Amino acid sequence: MTLEEFRTSLSRDEPPSELSLALAGLWWDAKGDWKRAHESAQQDEGPAGSWVHAYLHRKEGDSSNADYWYGRADKAPSKSSLEQEWLAITESLVKSDPHFPSEK
């Protein structure tokens, strides 16, 4: 899956089944469903889920909780816009997900 295919999938009612929990969290966030996004990210206890979890708490306005999750993800707290951060995380996770061929 490419970033463009990920974005195109946002026209669906449900995320593609092959998405990781972290990517599904970003998918739900893009659909405007913070609660489902958070639930999905929370299920991924690794760095990817922690990164999405941090972004979601930053978006929510809970900076101390976001900082905790950035630390768990081994990422510096983002200073970019939420839109830029969403794109950066999505691009990184799509490229690193073993279920998807790398974009050329």
Image (cartoon, rainbow, N blue to C red):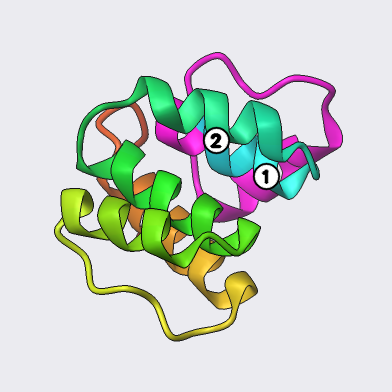
Q: Secondary structure at mark 2?
A: helix
Circle 2 packing at 10 Å, graded few (<14), some (14-19), many (20+), is many
Mark 1, secondary structure of its residue: helix
In the image, what residue occupies the spot 48% across and 18% down? 18
Q: Is residue 81 left or right of residue 92?
A: right
Location of residue 25 (image quadrant): top right
Give the Cα separation between the discs numbered 1 and 2: 6 Å
- Residue at left offset 42%, top offset 28%: 42
Name the residue located 37 percent from the left edge and 34 percent from the top edge.
Answer: 100
Q: Is residue 32 left or right of residue 34?
A: right
Picture coordinates of residue 8, whole percent (x, y) = 74, 44
**Circle 2 residue:** 25
Q: Is residue 35 above or below residue 103?
A: above
Q: Residue 1's x, y, as percent?
A: 49, 38
Q: Could you tell me residue 92's position as x and y percent?
A: 34, 57
Q: Is residue 13 above or below residue 95?
A: above
Q: Amino acid at mark 2?
A: Gly
Q: Position of residue 64 (x, y in %)?
A: 39, 62
Q: Residue at x 19, y 58 (%)?
A: 71
Quadrant (top left, top right, bottom left, bottom right) of the C terminus: bottom left
Residue 102 seen by the camera = no
**Residue 9 among those drawn in magenta:** yes
From what the image shows, is residue 28 above or below residue 72? above
Contact, mark 1 vs mark 2 (Cβ under 8 Å): yes
- Residue type beneath disc 1: Asp
**Residues in magenta?**
1-23
Front position in the image: 36 or 97:
36
What residue is shown with label 1? 29
